Image: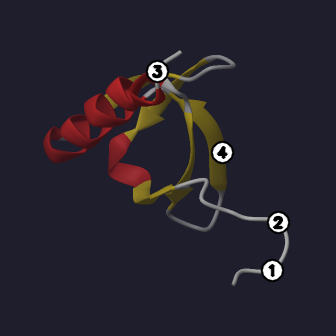
Amino acid sequence: MADSDKPQKINIGFLGGPVLSARVVPDELTKLRAALESGGWHDLEAQESTVALDLSKIVYVLVDNEAHRVGFGG
């Protein structure tokens, strides 16, 4: 699998505080960002399942860059 197709971890924050974590391919993240501009409902195809989102309730989308390292930097 190419890095451009590798699923990314995202966290979606909603009004009131709940957070949904999911792993999505970059194309799905692009579709979600485009859908946020128009509002309404959006079906997010995550690695684990399909999630129907009320876009008017989303406060943020956090994308994990997975650049975490173990050990000491030098």
Q: CA distance from mark 2 to mark 1?
A: 7 Å
Crowd tier of the residue under label 3, counting other residues whose Cα lies within 10 Å: few below 14, some 14–19, many 20 or above: few
Residue topped by disc 1: 72
| Residue 51 point in image, percent of width and height | 55, 24
Q: How many marks?
A: 4
Left or right, 27 with reference to 67: left
SS for tag 4? strand
**Of 7 and 46, which appears nearest the observer?**
7
Q: Which mark is residue 51?
A: none
> Could you say which quadrant of the image residue 9 lies in?
top right
Question: Mark 3 or mark 1: which comes first in sequence?
Answer: 3
The nearer-to-camera label among 4 and 2 is 2
**Of 73 and 40, which appears nearest the observer?**
73
* 44 over 33 or under it: above or below: above
> Could you say which quadrant of the image residue 48 lies in?
top right
Q: Which mark is residue 2?
A: 3
Q: CA distance from mark 2 to mark 3?
A: 23 Å
Q: CA distance from mark 3 to mark 4?
A: 23 Å
Question: Mark 4 or mark 1: which comes first in sequence?
Answer: 4
* 2 over 38 or under it: above or below: above
Disc 2 residue type (three-letter): Val
Question: Mark 3 or mark 4: which comes first in sequence?
Answer: 3
| Residue 58 point in image, percent of width and height | 42, 54
SS for tag 1? loop
